[in-house]
Image: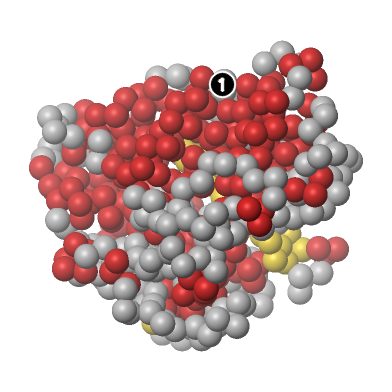
Amino acid sequence: MKLTYIFIALILCSACNKFLDQQPLSTATDQTTWKSEADANASVAGCYSLLRTAFNASIQFYVYGDLPTDEFSPDYVLGGDGNAYMNAAKVNWGVAVPVANTYDVRLKLRVYNNFYSAIAQSNRCLHFIRTMPESVFTSSSRNKYLGEAYFTRAFAYFYMARVWGDIPLDTTYYADNSAAPQLARTPQATVLAQCITDLDLARQYLGWKDGSSVDKVVRGDKGAVFALLAHLYAWKGDYDKCNAACDSLINSGTYSLLPAASYMNLYKGQSDESIFEISNNSTSEALQTWNSISGFTLCAPYLPAYTLPQWQLNNATLNSLYYDEGDIRFRQAFTVVSSGSADYYSCVKYAQIAFINNNTTYPIAKNNLLIFRLADIKLLKAEALAAKASPDEAGAIAQVNEIRTRAGVPVYNSISGAALQDSIVAERGRELFLEGARFYDFVRLARNTGHIKFSYINATEFAQGKYYWPLDPSLFLLNNKLTQTPYWQGKIQ
């Protein structure tokens, strides 16, 4: 198919207080808008709105980043069409789905249209904001909007590269979407190089977090740029640059770890520890719980309709990760649910539930998507120090111990080599459980040490690239330049 961009042609609501309540401009309005700073602001807001749509569709942020790991018991992952989420958990990603079944979760997880919609909006913003008169902007706001557009484009491309590997790359704005060319998959290295170029521009244009803004950390800023660079360089295995990006963020003094007693405030959104979030916490943004991670990981009393979570957590993994009895992360973020002779665990990180008009049959989930936070970056720095060509193992342990001290568990003394890298990934598992990170942590660990932590990807399959998702065959119908993800060639119809 032509690189398909889906645009939402809705009239902007000037009465909206939160910027993400606004919708992206459509191509139909391009010739009649872009006249004022408010137009630029609303258009950049549309980039975040479309990212939210991409991540919320079929709970993709958590399906890609958590579900195919040891966090869940795959045989007890329910919901979706034809046990779609169970298929995702077991890395049965090539299950055939009729093209007509566009509602099927398994098909939705294999298409990238929503991400390209967000990229197209970033391209549109960069095209038009550059040409708007300087006189319509206050102070350096034009640069801020340009920086956000570069950041959102880089963020979408990096995320897609981790999911699919090679992906079509396009940085062009098209006034006529039908003129968009068919594009083959671009090598991942080229895509990531473009992301770095965009982020180098974004960090020149953006300032550090504005702690007084109602939009703090739900719009890209310099901290979000450095966090994304750190993860990008870690994915590339360039740990010297990863470490430098982590240091730029940590040494800025802009962010701080929350006290142990306030740990769960992380999940209420916009905390002092948070670096970048996708806003979901207003009534207009929130999801119905049955379409959200809350609906699959919570049960009574948060969701009275469920006696057990639909996605059951892996008790063995929880016992292995949280072996220190006093770990505040386990004590505060999990509850035990008993059913018959068995105990089940529920993760309550995403328990910001509201009931529309006090109707208990219509709950909505109001947790932001927590993308980057300071503990994540400190542990990523530990990984960088342990995995780089000239390891600094003492420095890595110091970073891990800072997080362990906050959690109220004993510090590490001396660990080295691959065992240290395993321990860092385990600490990330404890700290970032169900935060969209563990799958990619496992990929990097396997690359760095050869240690395979996946239940449904063995060493041979990993070397063949099974951890990249296939493209759905429906994408090939309109774009004959696309090819299937290498591992999945001949394995999906």
* Image point (62%, 42%), residue name: 173
Is 140 on the left or on the right of 224, as rendered?
Answer: right
The quadrant in which the C terminus is found is bottom left
- Tell which of 377 and 25 is nearer to you: 25
Q: Position of residue 476 (x, y in %)?
A: 48, 70
- Tell which of 464 and 293 is nearer to you: 464
Residue 183 vs 267, above or below: the answer is: below
| Neighbourhood count class around disc 1 (C-alpha, 10 Å): few under 14, some 14–19, many 20 upward | many
Can the viewer see residue 110? Answer: no
Displayed quadrant of residue 130: top right
Q: Position of residue 469 (x, y in %)?
A: 39, 65
* Image point (25%, 69%), residue name: 457
Can the viewer see residue 194? Answer: yes
* Image point (36%, 55%), residue name: 165
Is 123 on the left or on the right of 24, as rendered?
Answer: left
Q: Position of residue 413 (x, y in %)?
A: 16, 36
Displayed quadrant of residue 76: bottom left
Is 347 on the left or on the right of 69, as rendered?
Answer: right
Displayed quadrant of residue 208: top right
Q: Secondary structure at mark 1?
A: helix
Q: Which residue is mark 1?
A: 205
Q: Position of residue 410 (x, y in %)?
A: 26, 41
Q: Amino acid at mark 1?
A: Tyr
The quadrant in which the N terminus is found is bottom right
* Image point (36%, 29%), residue name: 246
- Tell which of 487 and 294 is nearer to you: 487
Residue 103 vs 15, above or below: the answer is: below
